[in-house]
Amino acid sequence: MPVTIFGTPGYIAPEQASHSAAELKPTADIYSLGAILFDLLAGRPPFLGAHALSVIRQAAESPAPKLRTLSKLADRDLETICSRCLEREPTARYRSAHDLAEDLERWLEGRPIVARPVSPPIRIWRWAKRNPKLGVTIAACAILGTTLVMRQMQTRRLVDTVREQVLAQHSIAVLPFLDLDHAKLNPDLGSNFSAVLNVDLQRRGPARVLAGSFQDTSSAFSNAANIRMAARTYKARAVLSGTYRSGPGGIRISLRLTDAEGNLLFRRIKTAATVEGVFSEISDSDLNDIYSLLDQTNWDKLISAQEDAAFRNERSRDLLLAGRELTQRQSAADLARAIECFNKAIDAEPKSILARTEFTRAITTRTHYQFDTALLASASKAAREAVEMDGSSGEAHRALASVLFHTGRPADSLEEILQFIELSGPDVPAIALSGSLWRTLGHPEQALAWFELMAQWQRRPAEDIWIIGDCWADLGDDAKAEAIYRRAVELYPQLPDGWIGLCHLKLLNRDFAGARALCDENKNHHPESVYPRQMAAQVEFFAGNFIEAERFYSELSNTDPGGGSHFYSAVSYESALGRIRLERGDPAGGRMLLAIAEQKELSALAAAPGHPEILYRLAALEASQKNIVDALAHLAAARQAGLLDYRSMIVDPRFDALRSEPQFQQISLEMKESVDRLRSFAEAPPSIGNNALSHTQ
């Protein structure tokens, strides 16, 4: 049955055209009210058409037009009310005429309508329009309050910024302290000291003291590169590093404060019976000096004042730079020219400490190529002058340590190099020299700790890693020594040290054929180095092949008559040639060479009493001349001074005359027992616990 439509097209709901009157709901009337409201405001109904059917179809298929497109009088809320009434879906319209009337009243009163909730700011704005006086008052209070809050926040931010800037200016990173007795980092001393320093400095003003991580071993040393890294890591303006060691006066602690580039700002050395006592030795004056330094915004004048006098003299500066470049070339001829440059730099600027230390360094480096007593005397004079000019110069103490090492005074040299580390901080050459000195003094287990520290510190495996093998060989652990030597060969095949160490091990174990094969395989690969020729000569000498040994030692002696003493087994060229000539039927020539060499060693012993290696070399010369009593006396003194190389002594032909002597056998046994005891220490080194004095117990 067709549906009869009642109502005026354009004012009836879409559902009214397709449903019976019984099915219609109040929402149909809402549509009609909306159409009437639309007509009143826009002057026309929502839909227009040529006939009634067209109007009804538009209402059913198309949304009603926006009121504001047809009327300038309507605002957005009134347009929303009309649109809500004219929704095609009945459920989307107002539910009743009452709801429509309430929304119209809200619109009339300027309140938010239900059909379109508005944001809080618009609600406030409409409320203010309804209550203008109260709105203005509240707005003024809100603006004033906001202004006050913003100013307070800005002030707080400014205070925080200024405080952070002051803290940054007074910030220090404290690196782990280095135990010079055991060549190890102390995990607690640095952090304990940083806590004490933080409290003391904050009594003087804003300050921030941070303890560097013990695990970060690469930043635990006080060279310039690691200081820069520590400063970046901990965002510190200054870096404090330190060392400590035991001595006759108690515990000696050095403190070094540098800027972020490693330039020295403050340095103190304190001594007390305990570590805790050392902390109390840091006076108010010291702390005031530190805080005063941190107060300064610029340290350029302080740093420039430390510049060596040679750099303020153009001629001496140029000579220094030229000498340094020549030293880097590492040849005897270039080192001779470098020595000349540094000597001229001293003449050009007599107040220069650096010129003297560089002069000394070039001479001591040259001794590896040719030993020259007169040159070493000049180096000693220059180094001592440098120390006298400035006893706080670390480089002056390093130069003196090097001279003392090369002139056979290892104990004095060790004290000087430790003073260098205290004054200037550790570096690879200082660590290496410390290890070499401990080894000379008969403590390869201590030397091993220093060399392992050096290997740990360096960014890549050290070229002189072989020296760790030497320590294990001294301690009688040939397996560990061989592993290190083989690693040296693998990492640095261009250097002879690895295979020479392997050859030395074979000699100690009387494997002369194996040692000779290694020499034959490698000796021509390093023509610039004297060590392969020294090892080849020693192999033949120890093997009893005296014809070949004489040929090798004669060639070596022609180049460096006083050489050989500082190579493995301490076989000087003269002592070997003297022993060989005795064996080959030239007793007069042999005795003459041995006597000359003996006088040299006696002079060396007078200059360095108690030096174990000199005593050993002297005993070898006396044994070669069958002076049994003196030889045994000097050998016993060498053992007492720390000599451990009993294995070389057993295979060295110079000691043939002592083999059957009970005292010789007893000395060998005592050396072996010492080696076994020290090896146990090296395999289980003492730990550094919370008590920094545990190493002295």
Image (cartoon, helix red, strand yellow):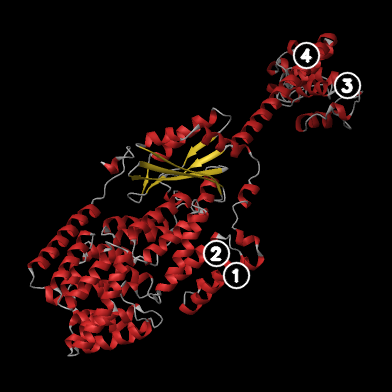
Q: CA distance from mark 4 to mark 1?
A: 78 Å
- Measuring 30% from the left and 74% from the top, which residue is drawn there? 600
The nearer-to-camera label among 2 and 3 is 2
Answer with mark 4 or mark 2, whichever residue precedes in sequence.
4
The N terminus: image quadrant: top right
Packing grade of label 3 (10 A; few <14, some 14-19, many >=20) is: some
Kindly indicate whether the residue at mark 1 contacts the one at mark 2 (C-beta within 8 angstroms).
yes
Q: CA distance from mark 2 to mark 1?
A: 9 Å
x and y percentages locating residue 257 in the rendered image = 52, 44
The residue where tag 4 is placed is 141
- Measuring 81% from the left and 9% from the top, which residue is drawn there? 134
Packing grade of label 4 (10 A; few <14, some 14-19, many >=20) is: few
- Secondary element under disc 3, as helix, strand or loop, is helix
The residue where tag 3 is placed is 39
Task: Please state which amino acid type lies under the numbered disc 1.
Answer: Leu
The residue where tag 1 is placed is 319
Kindly indicate whether the residue at mark 1 contacts the one at mark 4 (C-beta within 8 angstroms).
no
Answer with mark 2 or mark 1, whichever residue precedes in sequence.
1
Q: Determine whether 257 is above or below 598 in the image.
A: above
Q: Nearer the viewer, residue 120 or 679?
A: 679
x and y percentages locating residue 405 in the rendered image = 37, 63
Task: Please state which amino acid type lies under the numbered disc 2.
Answer: Ala
Packing grade of label 1 (10 A; few <14, some 14-19, many >=20) is: many
Q: Determine whether 567 is above or below 609 in the image.
A: below
The C terminus: image quadrant: top left
Packing grade of label 2 (10 A; few <14, some 14-19, many >=20) is: many
Q: CA distance from mark 2 to mark 3?
A: 106 Å
The residue where tag 2 is placed is 355
- Secondary element under disc 4, as helix, strand or loop, is helix
